[in-house]
Amino acid sequence: MQSHIIGIRFTKIGKIYHFDSSGVPEISVGDHAIVDTARGDHLGEVVQLSEKAPENQKGGWKKVLRRATPGDLLLAETWKAKETAALIDCRDIASKMKLPDAKIIKADFNYNGSCLTYLFSHEGDKKINLNKLRNAMQKEYSNTKVEMRQIGPRDVAKIMGGLGACGQEKRCCTMFLTDFSPISIKMAKAQGISLAPSEITGMCGRLRCCLIYEYEAYAKARKTLPKRKKRVVTPKGEGRVIDLNPLTETVVVQLNDEVRGARHSFHRDEIEPWNEREALRRKAAEPCNENCNCGQKKDDQPQGR
């Protein structure tokens, strides 16, 4: 039995939210629908039909109210055209109130203008109170419910757009990232990337989202390679690992009998851990005990050291 849970997106490159479409059974991907949300009725595009119902969220699924009509789509465009003026008004009032710590990023009307949400960012550690600003904007738009919602630096970068830190014409978050994954310094270290801020920091001031793209491949490859400073046995002799190339499955080794700085590259199949080789050598040098079944006669056994 097919699930009535569908995925709806409110912006072109945005997160997918799930709703119960049991009241509108004939809806399909590409249709626009009016849905019930915590911030009132909103218009979104159906991008996903779930054959199997996702895990039920706390409080249950919000409902799909109806299909959007051509009139709804036209109304949404009309209110969208008013967002720039609403943003300018809010910034002017915020400036008069001397709220320099609050940056008003975007004004967002819902499809019928009944709700206006201002997205703002704040970089300080202290919580900022924008109730006065919200009340002032409520007076300006008396027939609309006005809300203030704080967003993080990554969301700001996604909305503002611009060049990527790598030089791309558009940032990844504005082209295809619909959600932000947790990023850590560990990911940069695993890939051998310089930890200089200019190399790992994005235009949002946070660690670059692209650090996660190849992290799993590097992490998987590293599990098959010895760690740095480990002693290994190579076709050219014993040495220590001084560098790793996970994607080519090779290691760089400094041999014991060479001057410092000399480097040799070996594939992982060409080397073996020194401790394993040493353990086998010691075992081979030990005399057999009574339970040994190697087939060697006692007279033929090598004398113990």
Image (spheres, rainbow, N blue to C red):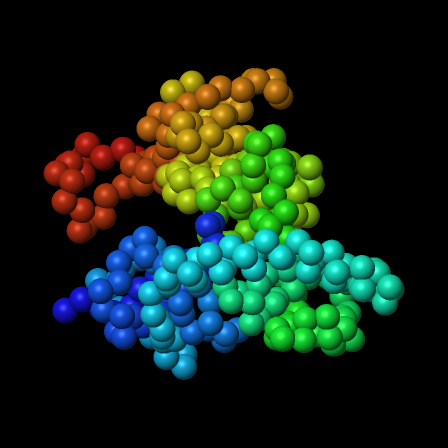
Residue 179, percent across and down?
48, 54
Residue 82, percent across and down?
62, 57
In the picture, the quarter occupied by the C terminus is top left
> Residue at the location (27% across, 75% down)?
23
In the picture shown, does residue 111 fall above or below 252? below
Task: Spot the residue most to the front.
Answer: 71
The quadrant where residue 214 appears: top left
Q: Is residue 55 visible?
A: no
Residue 249, percent across and down?
39, 30
Does 169 sit left or right of 264 as displayed?
right
Residue 177, percent across and down?
48, 48
Does 78 sit left or right of 6 as displayed?
right
In the picture shown, does residue 172 fall above or below 80? above
Task: Spot the residue most to the bottom.
Answer: 59
> Residue at the location (18% across, 66% down)?
2
Of 108 and 48, the residue lying toward us:
108
Q: Is residue 264 visible?
A: yes
The quadrant where residue 141 appears: bottom right
> Residue at the location (56% across, 40% down)?
171
In the picture shown, does residue 61 fall above or below 303? below
Of 183 and 4, the residue lying toward us:
4
In the picture, the quarter occupied by the N terminus is bottom left
